[in-house]
């Protein structure tokens, strides 16, 4: 996983998580990146401070990676414990909740990237879950 600081044409800054740098490049070239605040598709990498590793920094890297894994695992577990799993009906159920046709509640499930983009375009607040890196669920 790689995290980039991104900025839209309106100056909103946010993080983007990608499998690797080529995944970012492909999404950028295909115009698939969008600002979570204003939905602008004009998004680029923001200036980031380089991560310089010195000899005294080397022992901290495994701890940082472990902390990141713990955070992502904890976030995923929190969502699974506090939201209703709706499986492949996520997009449909999210729309029903958004438009007041279903009980307002937290949900999670599966959807395609195209469906997720359509939800965002409609003004729904959706985000992907961190990957299941420990294979627990």
Image: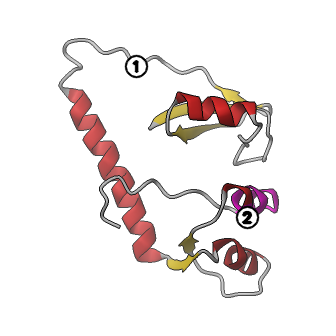
Q: Nearer the viewer, residue 131 or 13?
A: 131
Residue depicted at x 30% and y 51%: 70
Compared with 6, 52 (above or below) is above
Q: Which residue is mark 2?
A: 124
Question: Magenta includes 7?
Answer: no
User: Which span is picked out in magenta?
Assistant: 115-124
Nearer to me, 113 or 42: 113
Residue 126, numbered circle: none
Q: Residue at x 74, y 55 (%)?
A: 117
Residue 118 falls inside the magenta stretch: yes
Q: Is residue 3 above or below residue 68?
A: above
Residue 59 against residue 99 in the figure, above or below = above
Task: Name the spot of residue 50 as percent of width and height, x first.
Answer: 45, 16
Query: Image check: 28 left or right of 136?
Result: right
Q: Earlier in the sequence, mark 1 or mark 2?
A: 1
Alpha carbon separation for disc pair 1 and 2 = 35 Å
């Amino acid at each position: 996983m790689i995290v980039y600081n991104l900025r839209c044409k309106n100056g909103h800054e946010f993080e983007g998580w990608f499998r690797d740098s080529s995944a970012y490049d492909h999404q950028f070239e295909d115009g698939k990146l969008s600002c979570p605040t204003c939905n602008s598709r004009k998004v680029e990498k923001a200036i980031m401070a380089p991560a310089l590793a010195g000899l005294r920094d080397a022992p901290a890297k495994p701890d940082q990676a472990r902390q990141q894994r713990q955070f992502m695992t904890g976030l995923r577990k929190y969502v699974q414990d506090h939201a209703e799993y709706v499986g492949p009906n996520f997009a449909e159920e999210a729309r029903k909740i958004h438009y007041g046709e279903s009980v307002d509640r937290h949900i999670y499930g599966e959807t395609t990237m195209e469906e997720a983009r359509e939800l965002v375009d409609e003004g729904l607040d959706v985000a992907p879950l961190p990957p299941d890196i420990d294979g627990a669920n």
